Amino acid sequence: MKNLRKILLAIVTVVAFASCGTDADTVAEIKDEAGLLVNVSATSNSSILGNPAPGVDLGDAEVTVTNAYLNMTVNQTAGSITSLQKIEIVKSYNGGEEISLGESTSLPYNLEVASLDELLAGTGVAATDLRIGDVLNFKTKIYKTDGSVYYFNSSMGDYSLVVNCASNLAGSYTINYTSGPAIYNVTEVSPGLYESDQMIGWPTSGYWVRFTDTCGMISFDINDWRFAASNPVAGNGFVDADGNLVWSDITVGGIGAIGTTWTMYKN
């Protein structure tokens, strides 16, 4: 089963490259005439959500879409637009051909797409082709007045909509440890992506961790918790019929298993 993907919005240091069709993980750095840095954000209702056909393997089930919407903004965070000719947003479905979605000669640039037909236009993908886990990706390109073209680094200039089931896991949960109960506060970062203010199985304030929900199957992103650089985390689970989060086989790099099964009971 495909896991929900996400885009980190943190600005990172990157390397300059200056030709059309450059590697998508390159970007103009700020020095000399190179340009500007941006970040991309989207409203919380930006998503492609639906219900997969019952009784069919999730990877094969046709999805009845209940929400298809994008409202994203490209903001300038540093540098200058003096040498900017235009900003362009291109889209691709599951890594396929890039199609231009919109462009602007100034920043910030807001782009709103309010229908599934418009989101899929030009991709060759029909609504009946959608499957849970498919990805509609949006890349930011900068065209300079000297004719050079850059893709912004994916962590800076990309945003993705992942076809997923509707999810509503935000709230307060309790894990009953032998030392006593511990409260976990879960917030929604984006559709299907959540952050717990404490690590499951490791109730220490500030050890936050993020996880995804793909149609009731939950999992950690190994790169998205407080100590990801030194201690990557792994683990999977499911949402039970009462809305509790049941985790199993959680491991932390350098430490090992931190419990066989942990249940986060919905408060």
Image (tube, rainbow, N blue to C red):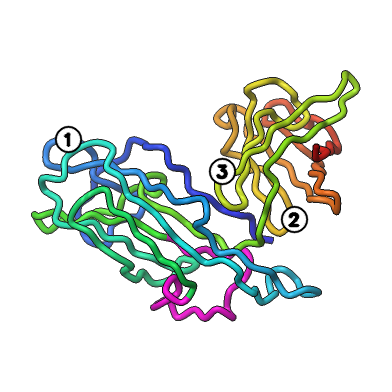
Q: Is residue 103 above or below residue 218?
A: below
Q: What amino acid is at disc 3?
A: Val
Which numbered disc covers residue 66?
Answer: none
| Left or right: 238, with 142 as reference point | right
User: What number is the disc on residue 189?
Assistant: 3
Of residue 84 and residue 96, the one placed in the foreground of this image is: 84
Badge 1 or badge 2: first in the primary sequence = 1
Q: Residue at x 55, y 64 (%)?
A: 48
- Left or right position of 223 against 120: right
Disc number at residue 216? 2
Number of residue marks:
3
Q: Nearer the viewer, mark 1 or mark 3?
A: 3
Check contact, mark 2 vs mark 3: CB within 8 A: no
Locate residue 149: give its quadrant: bottom left
What kind of element bears circle 2?
loop
User: Residue 8, relative to residue 197: is it above or below?
Assistant: below
Residue 224, horizontal then vertical, whole percent: 57, 37
Q: Dot 1: few (<14), some (14–19), or many (≥20) neighbours within 10 Å? A: few
Q: State how far apart marks 1 and 2 are (Cα).
A: 47 Å
Asked whether the beta carbons under mark 1 and mark 3 sit within 8 Å of each other, the answer is no
Q: Amino acid at mark 1?
A: Lys
Q: Residue at x 49, y 57 (%)?
A: 46
Q: CA distance from mark 2 to mark 3?
A: 17 Å
Q: Residue at x 80, y 40 (%)?
A: 266
Q: Which residue is mark 1?
A: 31
The percent position of residue 255, horizontal first and vertical second, equals: 72, 26
Chain part drawn in magenta = 117-137
Pointers 1 and 2 in contact (CB under 8 A)? no
Question: Quick check: is 145 in the magenta stretch?
Answer: no
